[in-house]
Amino acid sequence: MKPPAPAPFLSACRREPAEYTPVWVMRQAGRYMPEYRAIRARLGFLELCKNPEAAAEVTLLPVERLGVDAAIIFADILLPVEPMGVGLEFAKGEGPLIHRPVRTAADLNRLADVDPGEATPFVFEAIRKVCAALKERVPLIGFAGAPFTLASYLIEGGPSREYLHTKRLMHDDPATWHALMERLVKVTVGYVNGQIAAGAQAVQLFDSWVGTLSPDDYRECVLPHSRATIDGLTPGVPVIHFGTGTAGLLELMREAGGDVIGLDWRVDLGAAWKRVGYDVAVQGNLDPGLLLARPAEIRRAVRAILQRAGGRPGHIFNLGHGVLPETPVDHVGAMVDMVHEISVGGGLRPPSDSSPPELRGPSPRSNDPS
Ligand code: CP3
């Protein structure tokens, strides 16, 4: 008997040909879904994350409703730092708050030394439940924050625009900066390897806010720690290395590691893939705002991205960042179907010249047979 074909998502992570371009959506289980809002009416966000039954149920929602090619465990990048004693709270409408920020060597020394493999048993339990329900039908992605993005929350105490406390620590007290980053590498490696042991078949490292840095600061203050994190992960499990606002950092992120480089929508996917090299896969990169537009416009944008990927094995379709709460669920489902339909059987050829398709010849809308 022939073994079953590998899941398209895992094939793409390994740059192997797949039946069609796999697609999933960052924040695919979230507030844009009425089913999610109903569960959140009963449970606080942290309560939900710590309830393996409910977290597993939420994880499976988009797989069933949208037909995405991967599930991502419902959890948060800040869960593994909560046991360090920083006072984590998810305040309504404000995002995460850290009540005892880490800004000095003394603050760092106060952090509890926790075993990340033991501190978040509820995440691992939720992963086991999801894997049992999915039975290899659809792969499950585990995830964690990359050290910089985690450090930025711990230092700022919450979301930030300018990252001034973070940059001050980085430049004025590099010893404390690097010591904090080393602590976070240890926590992240243990947290992710725990997820892999529980059954996650791929992992994504979210360096969501690293785009605030200059290339020199990234190289000096972040790259070695992101690399140590990726090098510490259980071998054989594909790693997606994602950030936003990273147009100036892509080569360096690639140098830090990962089998797949995540691209946001501010870069041209074809040009960015060429920059990071065809020996890695890429993920992205539809503007999340486009999902609020009419389906005909979504189709045009999906097509343009698939065309830039050129049918080359190793493209995972995704948004350039998380789905927005205002997004109609039907638009997300339609996008998933469009990606499958347009790419089936090897995808689109790359544009014949390097100019974007909308600048060439008759408009792709007018000659689009699909
Ligand atoms: O992708 C998924 O569906 C899995 C779930 C997931 C969540 N957080 C659930 C969540 C993932 C992958 C994350 C990662 C995460 N968390 C990141 C990196 C991804 C990114 O968006 O850049 C970051 C920076 C965080 C920290 C965090 N947690 C923020 C900034 C917020 C508030 C933002 C918001 O949308 O309100 C959270 C809360 C959070 N994490 C929510 C969800 C579904 C919203 C909570 C709610 O129900 O009110």
Image (tube, rainbow, N blue to C red):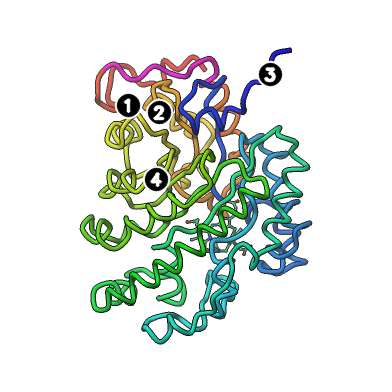
Disc 2 marks a residue whose amino acid type is: Ala
Depth check, mark 4 against mark 2: the one in front is 4
Instruction: Please state if 319 lies on the left or on the right of 70 as rendered.
Output: left
Q: Which residues are magenta?
A: 342-352
- Residue indicated by mark 4: 264
Name above or below for residue 345 compared with residue 218. Answer: above
- Residue indicated by mark 3: 3
Q: CA distance from mark 2 to mark 1?
A: 8 Å
Q: Quadrant of the N terminus?
A: top right
Q: Residues within 10 Å of mark 1 (few under 14, many from 20)?
A: few
Whether pointer 2 and pointer 1 mark residues with C-beta atoms closer than 8 Å, the reply is yes
Picture coordinates of residue 181 (x, y %)?
Answer: 39, 67
Disc 1 marks a residue whose amino acid type is: Glu
Q: Residues within 10 Å of mark 4 (few under 14, many from 20)?
A: many
Q: CA distance from mark 3 to mark 2?
A: 34 Å
SS category of the residue bearing label 2? helix
Which of marks 4 and 1 precedes in the sequence?
Answer: 4
